[in-house]
Image (spheres, helix red, strand yellow):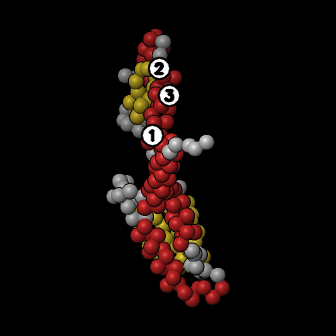
Amino acid sequence: MPTEDALARARGAGLDLIEISPNAQPPVVKIGDYGRLKYEQSKKDKDARKKQRNFELREVKLRPKIETHDYETKARMAERLLLDGSKIKVTIMFRGREITYTGFGKRLLDRMAEDLAPIALIEREARLEGKNMFMILAPRPTPTGPPKFSSQKEHAQDHKDETQAEDHEENLKEPTSA
């Protein structure tokens, strides 16, 4: 149909002539409400953005001579970030003569990967660049087990609540002497 006839038919219906496929021979058009088409397209785009997962790379920094409690704190932080859907870059910073003991750093990164294995996959193996050694962990689509450190904290809190409840019950049972 000629363009002028299509435009006249669209105007007669009080609608717009919308070009669907401009590269086709002849171009494909339809008669419809352009404002409604734009609205529906924006809704589709918004839904697509909502379903899209944005991976953010977060960093957890360690030192080769880290103490056990400090390591657990950093691992708990990494766990939380992985559960939130972020990728983790675990970095070990060597200072001065510590660079000669890269084996300590490699073991520490291996330990971190092993501890976070139920919820994380190793995306990039441990690598030394300059005075830093790093490894990248990505969250698993479906965890293979419970988080190692978060569950300990929650378990300790539950145990604390239970003992407080037991102590409270014992205090209620004991007669008070006056």
Cα–Cα gap, marks 3 and 2 = 9 Å
Say which label, 2 or 1, has the lower sequence index: 2
Residue 33: image tag: 2
Residue 31: image tag: none
Residue placed at 52% from the left, 66% from the top? 72
Residue 48: image tag: 1
Element type where label 3 sits in the image:
helix
The image quadrant that residue 122 belongs to is: bottom left
The residue labelled by disc 3 is 38
Amino acid residing under circle 1: Ala
Residue placed at 43% from the left, 67% from the top? 115
* Residue 49 visible in the current orientation: no
- Taking depth in this image into account, of 145 and 68 the one nearest to the observer is 68
x and y, in percent, of residue 45 in the image: 47, 37
Amino acid residing under circle 3: Lys
* Residue found farthest to the top: 12
